[in-house]
Image (cartoon, helix red, strand yellow):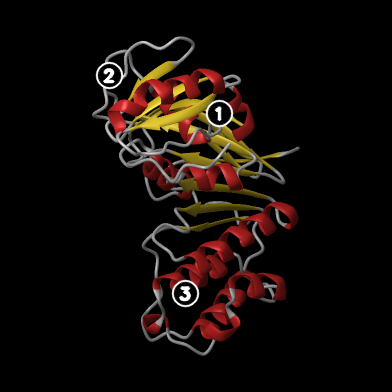
Amino acid sequence: MTALLTVTDLSLSPVLEEVSFTVERGEVVCVVGPPGNGATALIECLAGGTEPDAGHIEMLGATVGPGDRRPAGMAAALRGERLPDRMRIGDAVRLFSRLYGTRGLSGRLIDLLDLEPLMPKRFGGLTDGQRRRAMIGLALVGNPELTLLDEPTAGLREGSRNRIEATIDELRAGYGGVCVLLDDLAQAERLADRVVLLREGRILAEGAPSRLIGLLGSVHVLSVPPHLRVDRLSEVRVLPCAAATYLYGPRPALEAAVQELAPMSGDRVWSIRRPTLRDAYLTLSAVPDPPEPDPFGSEPAALEA
C-alpha cells in the first residue's frame, strides 16, 4: 500500500508529543482518545488550522508546513463547520463542484448520505444529522484521495450515524484513505483497519483492533460495581476504575469470581464477555495506583460471550 499521510514526531505543547503514524491507501485509520488527550489538536494540525511546534506532515507525497495549502487531493470535514443558514444544499454542491472542477457528488455517495431530499433545503433548517451529512458530502465533492473526518457521528441518532459509517466504508473501498478522529472505542473497533490510541498527547499503542485486543491474551472480562471489594483472585487481574471494577482472566476463573462475589451483590446478574478495544485501552493505560479513572465514562452494555 501507498502512504497518503505520514505524520512524523508531531508535537504541540502541551497537548501533543512526538506523534507518528501513517494512513495508507485503501484503509481507515481511527485516532482515538478521550477528551483532553490531544486528538482534536492533532486533526487541526493535519487540516492546517493549527501550527505544530515540531514534526513533519506529508500528504499525498508532498511535505506541508505551517501556512501551506493542503494538497488538492485532501479534504476535511471538521466539527463546527457550517454553511450560511439561507444557502440551499443543492446550490452549495454546485458551487463546490465549480471550485473543484468536478461533476459533483457521485450518485453512490448521494444515496449513502441520503442527500437527495436535502438538495432544495436551506442549511439553517436542517437537523444536526442532516447538517453533518451535508458537510461531509461537500468535503467529498472534489473526489479526494485522503479524507480527514473530525468526530463525524458524535451526538447523532442511529440513522445518520449508520449512513456516515457506510460512507466511510465506501471511501476506503473506492477513493483512497481516511483518517477519522473518534472518542468512541466501540465505533473505532467496527470501522478501523488500524487504530491509533492517544493518551495524554502521546501514542499509547497502534495497530489493527484485533491485534490490540489480542495484547490482553486469551481472557474474558467481568465488570462489577466499583464499591464492591474484590480481593486477590487466582488467575484474575483486577483493574479498579471510577465507573466499574474490571476483572480479566480465563472464563472458569471469572465464573468462580461470580460465585464468590454473589453474596455481596444481592440478586444482580453479571455477564462474562469477550474483551473489546475499550478493555485494551483501559489495560494499556492503567497505572499501578488504583482507582484509575475511566476516561471514556461508564461501562457499555455487556455482551454475552
Are the residues at dot 2 and dot 1 in contact (C-beta closer than 8 Å)?
A: no
Residue at (57, 21) in percent of width and height: 215
Along the horizontal axis of the image, is 41 left or right of 2? left
Say which label, 1 or 3, has the lower sequence index.
3
Mark identifier at residue 290: 2
Residue at (58, 72) in percent of width and height: 99
* Rendered position, 205 above or below 103: above
Q: Nearer the viewer, residue 110 or 67?
A: 110
Separation of residues labelled 2 and 1 (CA atoms): 25 Å
**Tag 1: amino acid:** Glu
- Mark 1 Cα-neighbour bin, 10 Å: few <14, some 14–19, many ≥20: some
Image quadrant containing the N terminus: top right
Q: Secondary structure at mark 3?
A: helix
Mark identifier at residue 206: 1
Q: Quadrant of residue 140?
A: bottom right
Q: Quadrant of residue 282?
A: top left
* Rendered position, 17 above or below 172: above
Image quadrant containing the C terminus: top right
Residue 250 visible (yes or no):
no
**Tag 3: amino acid:** Gln
Count of labels in the image: 3
- Mark 2 Cα-neighbour bin, 10 Å: few <14, some 14–19, many ≥20: few
Percent coordinates x, y for residue 7 in the rendering? 54, 34
Q: Quadrant of residue 216?
A: top right
Residue at (49, 28) in percent of width and height: 221
Separation of residues labelled 2 and 3 (CA atoms): 43 Å
Mark identifier at residue 130: 3
Say which label, 2 or 1, has the lower sequence index.
1
Separation of residues labelled 1 and 3 (CA atoms): 33 Å
- Mark 3 Cα-neighbour bin, 10 Å: few <14, some 14–19, many ≥20: some
Along the horizontal axis of the image, is 68 left or right of 286? right
